[in-house]
Amino acid sequence: MITISVLGTGRIGTMHADAIAAHPRAQLGPVFDTHQPSAQTVADRLGVAVSTPEAIFANSDVDAVLVASATPTHADFIEQAVAAGKPILCEKPIDLSLERVNACAKAIAGSDVPVQIGFNRRFDPGHRAAYNAVREGRVGDVHQVIITSRDPELPPRSYMEAAGGFLRDMTIHDFDVARWILSEEPVEVFASVNAKGDPALLAELNEVDTAMIIMRTASGKQCHINNSRSATYGYDQRIEVLGDKGMVTSGNRKPHEMQFHDGNAVEVSAPYLDFFIERYREAFINEIHAFVDTVENGVPVKASFEDGHRALILAEAAYRSIAEKRLVQVSEITG
């Protein structure tokens, strides 16, 4: 039985704490949040202590840590976890600054302490099945990957003020899925964005809520990512992979698949699931399972620090494309 502490007990941290507490081979250790009442609420409900990051990293009874705190703390906690010899599962992104991520990479270079980044979509059963079908050659040579990722509505103003930009916050998942499915690094990026949901608010925040991004690998594989924060019909998450032998898709999830048929129409009674925790609930649980396997059995992580690094590089390439209204070579970002 391994003990995993959680740093950050907001919505997603609380979900992770529940998943750890329910895991058959793990137990929840002390928890921390800068907002003491939220940490205490989780601790009281799950029967653990509230602690500090310093005490958690120094605690020999804590085998690993899960970081779900504010983004500006991620790189610091990764460095501290590695220095303490504790495997870490850290929510995305590693940091909003590529310079800080590069510095973190140097700080932990040469360490064999596992660092897993919270790209939960790699663990979604449908997306994983599509990935496996591609790896098995069922679609043949991959020509195109199309990734649709749309939120049902704009997040609160306070969230957007702290998120670090649409492409670093939302699209970062899609950049990771693209690399994962393609199994090749994109070398070119072109991005087009707009502000549609609340133009006045978005203009005030210098933010956008819609994006289309085209990427190409050196071998000619194409990827199209389309994002929106204004999908009024629900949380829309789809992947399509086209190859010379066929196509594979991973679609949306609903509470159930019941349909009503009469002489006039077909009525679909269940909408898409509300948002990311509901849609990707199995993925989050599978992500914890994978992390436990890493800590307990040394299984290599399935979403590494470098995966987080490369996704942020693509986001930076996309932002340069937007600013300069041109196709950007990824090598311009990496040097």
Image: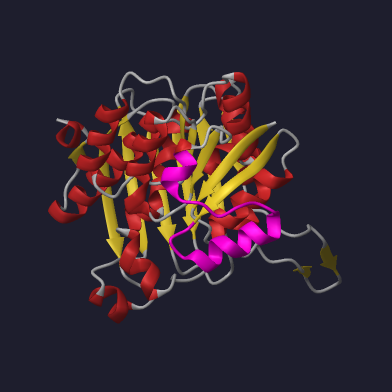
In the drawing, does residue 223 fall left or right of residue 334?
Answer: right
Q: Quadrant of the C terminus?
A: top left
Which of the colour schemes (rainbow, by chain, secondary structure, one colour) is used? secondary structure
What is the residue that sits farthest to the right in this orientation?
262
Q: Quick one: which residue is furthest to the bottom in this view?
A: 200
Q: Nearer the viewer, residue 262 or 12?
A: 12
Residue 269 lies, in percent from the top left, at: 77, 69
The N terminus - image quarter: top right
Left or right: where 121 falls relative to 106: right
Residue 73, visible in the rendered structure: yes
What residue is at 56 percent from the left and 26 percent from the top? 134
Magenta: main secondary structure equals: helix
Q: Is residue 56 covered in magenta? A: yes
Residue 188 falls in image quadrant: top left
- Is residue 212 in view from this perspective? no
Q: Nearer the viewer, residue 60 or 101?
A: 60
Q: Residue at x 85, y 72 (%)?
A: 263
In the foreground, 315 or 75: 75
Q: Is residue 197 magenta?
A: no
The picture places residue 4, in percent across and down from the top left corner, at 59, 39
Q: How many marks?
A: 0
Q: Position of residue 257 (x, y in %)?
A: 78, 57
Q: Is residue 98 above or below residue 136?
A: below
Q: What span is in magenta?
A: 33-57
Would you place residue 77 above or below residue 32 in this image? above
- Give the residue at x 77% y 69%: 267
- Residue 319 place in picture, x, y as percent: 23, 51
